[in-house]
Each structure stands twice: as C-alpha cells, then as structure tokens.
Image (spheres, grey):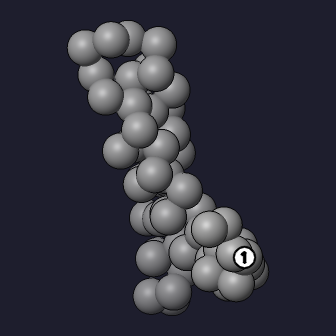
Amino acid sequence: MLKTLKNVALLVAGTISLVVGIVGVLLPILPGTPFLILAFFCFATLLESILESMFIAAWF
C-alpha cells in the first residue's frame, strides 16, 4: 500500500511539474526548465527502465 501511495504521489507531482514547466516555457516570467527536469525525475522514478537507460547512455 505504501508503494502505491508513493507511485500516486510521484505521478501527481510529475504531472503538476510538467504542466508548470510547459507554462514556464511559454511565459518569460516563470522558469520552465527546473520544473521539466523535476517532472522527468518523477516519471523516471516510476519507470525504472528509463532511469537505468539514462545512466547507461553515454551523452558526452
């Protein structure tokens, strides 16, 4: 039950961060990048395969 609650909280936080990040990209007053990064990490925690591929892939 605790894992389900954690997943729901991460899903809600990720969705809110994604919406605020998109609004922040469109509005010059609100920074969008930190919210988009937070949304990525919330969703990546839900899907551990994305998190693993992020650390395995060599970007630089």
Whether residue 33 is situated above or below residue 9 in the rendered picture: above
Q: Residue at x 39, y 23 (%)?
A: 24
Pick the quarter of the image with the C terminus: bottom right
Whether residue 29 is situated above or below residue 22 in the rendered picture: above
* Of residues 40 and 1, the one drawn nearer to the viewer in this rendering: 40
Where is mark 1, residue-wise? 57
Determine the image quadrant of residue 58: bottom right
Q: Is residue 33 left or right of residue 28?
A: right
Whether residue 49 is situated above or below residue 40 in the rendered picture: below
Q: Is residue 23 visible?
A: yes
Q: Residue at x 42, y 54 (%)?
A: 38
Q: Is residue 42 left or right of residue 50?
A: left
Determine the residue located farthest toward the left in the rendered image.
Answer: 29
**Percent x, y for residue 23?**
44, 20
| Element at label 1 | loop
Q: Residue at x 50, y 64 (%)?
A: 41
Disc 1 marks which amino acid?
Ala
**Percent x, y for residue 26?**
47, 13
Whether residue 53 is situated above or below residue 17 in the rendered picture: below
Q: Residues within 10 Å of mark 1 (few under 14, many from 20)?
A: few
**Percent x, y for residue 45?**
55, 75
Q: Is residue 47 visible?
A: no
| Numbered-mark total | 1
Q: Is residue 58 left or right of residue 14?
A: right
